[in-house]
Image (cartoon, grey):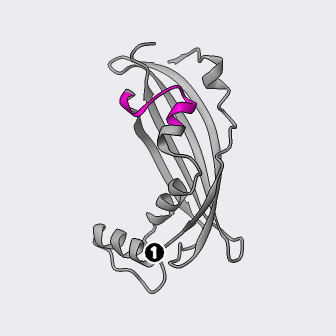
Amino acid sequence: MPVELPESIRAQVGRRFPGGVYTVEPYRAWLLADATADRPEDAIAHPLHAWLAATAGMGITWDELFAWFEATAEDGPMIGEHETELHRPVRMNRSYKVSGGIVSVMRKRGRTAGLFDLVEYQLELHDETDGGHAATCRNSIVFPRRGA
């Protein structure tokens, strides 16, 4: 059930990340493949690397993102949903421009969870070599509001 949001939180919708560039280094691609029991194929990185590239290149730290929503890591924010749409393979030794922003925020009250904010954000990866759209990552974060 939706609950009224403070204006300072509602104002974050539409806010853009500073963005940046992320290069898929072969050693990182190998480590991720090893951790997921995958075998790297030639120059193609594991699909999970799209999310790693997006979050590493968004241009702010997690603590800075939490601060946009008047929260800290000590408040216990949690990953909500995640979806990565690959438009082309993510390749090793390639650099990707990262852009994106805050899509929505809702304040809800759960029967057992109490009051919380659900923040949705989206990140895009574009290959710096040819500008091609490589991936779209849609994510959400749950911010508990214990004292509110």
For the magenta stretch, what is the residue range? 65-74
Q: In this view, does 36 lie to the left or right of 124?
A: left
Amino acid type assigned to the residue bearing label 1 in the image: Ala
Q: Which residue is drawn at 63% across and 39% down?
A: 103
Mark 1 falls on what kind of element?
Answer: loop
Tell me if mark 1 has few (under 14), some (14-19) or many (20+) residues whose alpha carbon lies within 10 angstroms of its own: many
Question: According to the image, label 1 marks what residue?
Answer: 45
Between 71 and 39, the one nearer to me in the picture:
71
Image location (x, y in percent) of residue 95: 59, 71
Q: Residue 91 in magenta?
A: no
**6 relative position to 141: left or right:** right
Q: Which residue is at 54% across, 74% downward?
A: 89
The answer to whether 113 is drawn above or below residue 31 in the figure is above
Question: Considering only vertical position in the picture, is 95 above or below 140?
Answer: below
Q: Where is residue 93 in the image (x, y as percent from the top left)?
A: 53, 79
Q: Where is residue 116 in the image (x, y as percent from the top left)?
A: 45, 23
22 to 94, vertically: above or below: above
Q: Which residue is drawn at 64% across and 21% down?
A: 8
